[in-house]
Amino acid sequence: MSLPSPRLTTDTSFASLDVEQLLPAFEKLVADTVAQVAACPAKPDATFEGYESLLAAIRSATTLEGLLLEKGIALVAGASPDLTVVTLDRPLPVAETAKALFRRNDWSKAAMLRLDSEVATREFYKPDLLIVAGSRQLALIVDVKRSVSSYKQRTLSDLRSRMMASALMVRDVLERDHDAPPVARADIAIIDGASECRNETKGIFALADLDWLLRIEGAADAIGRLRSLYGLKVRALLDARCEAIIAPRLTERNLGRGAERKGGTAAAGELAANVVDDALVDDDAQDEDLEDAEAADTPAPARLPGAASRPCRPRIAVGIATRGVH
């Protein structure tokens, strides 16, 4: 049975979202994600011997949270009649010439580039989300990070230049391969899921910025509800595993029932905090490695017959999402 579509009321610029109508879809998304966390196998670990199942759950939960946020934002965007969430069949090509210019922020020269979407290249970028706003003729290229602060500035700079370079190609790709509204501009946005970093001039935005990025009032609150639901389920899973691990250890030490409960709770909290810190340090670095591996393994798309002879059309405008524009 399909879920009812949330109702949106439109004013001059923003749509208003009823979060309650998205809850059934959010609950299913959370249940599916937590099931993956619970199913993550524990690997032998000399340091955390005896606690491997807890460590596996925490690392899995942090890794999957980024994907949860992506899917949640897609659900929110899909509720707006003006927004189209595009699923790309293959990554967008990244021209090294354009990437180098964007890396140096040489916007004037970059604006003069005329590139065909089938340009020969070995590098590709697949955005986490590609959202087309029909009324604004805007393609929004989104990369979602669980925590931007976990990344080095050099890594973020390279990501930003790849996103900008791929944005030059997005209109041709949409026209050729997808039934999407026409676009005249492509903007990029890196979303910090932790909302600790915000630097709009560098394309980094907090979850609270979703309302104006999507032009949906209540978008940020909706993702906040999603994260709250996820947190409740994840903590319940961790509590159960802490109890299963720590209670037998305390019993072996011949502690009394009252001391067992008190000590077990304190030890569980201290252990969980330490393991969370360890998992969070590794999580985004693992995401970065996976992203780089995906880009390296992605085969270059075959050139269409006659592609070399196709005239290069004027490029679309490319930029970083800006308040009060479009």
Image (cartoon, rainbow, N blue to C red):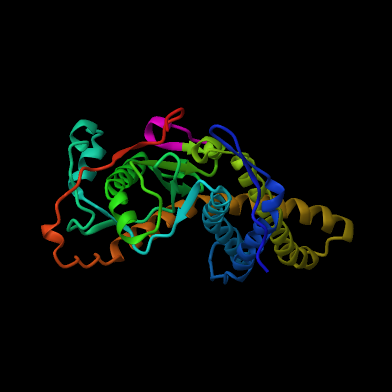
Q: Residue furthest left?
A: 309
Find residue 33 and report its image quarter. Answer: bottom right
In the image, residue 125 lies at what x, y percent?
32, 54
* Quarter in which the N terminus is drawn: bottom right
The location of residue 282, given as percent across then percent down, is 48, 54
User: Which residues make up the magenta segment?
Assistant: 196-204
Q: Residue at x 69, y 53 (%)?
A: 23
Q: Residue at x 29, y 62 (%)?
A: 296
Q: Position of residue 47 (x, y in %)?
A: 54, 62
Left or right: 276 in relation to 295: right
Q: Is residue 157 left or right of residue 104?
A: right
Q: Quadrant of residue 176?
A: bottom left
Q: Is residue 61 left or right of residue 149?
A: right
Q: Quadrant of the C terminus?
A: top left
Residue in front for this viewpoint, 312 or 245: 312
Q: Quadrant of residue 104?
A: top left
Residue nearest the observer in this picture, 58 or 25:
25
Relative vertical location of residue 266 with respect to residue 220 in this rendering, above or below? below
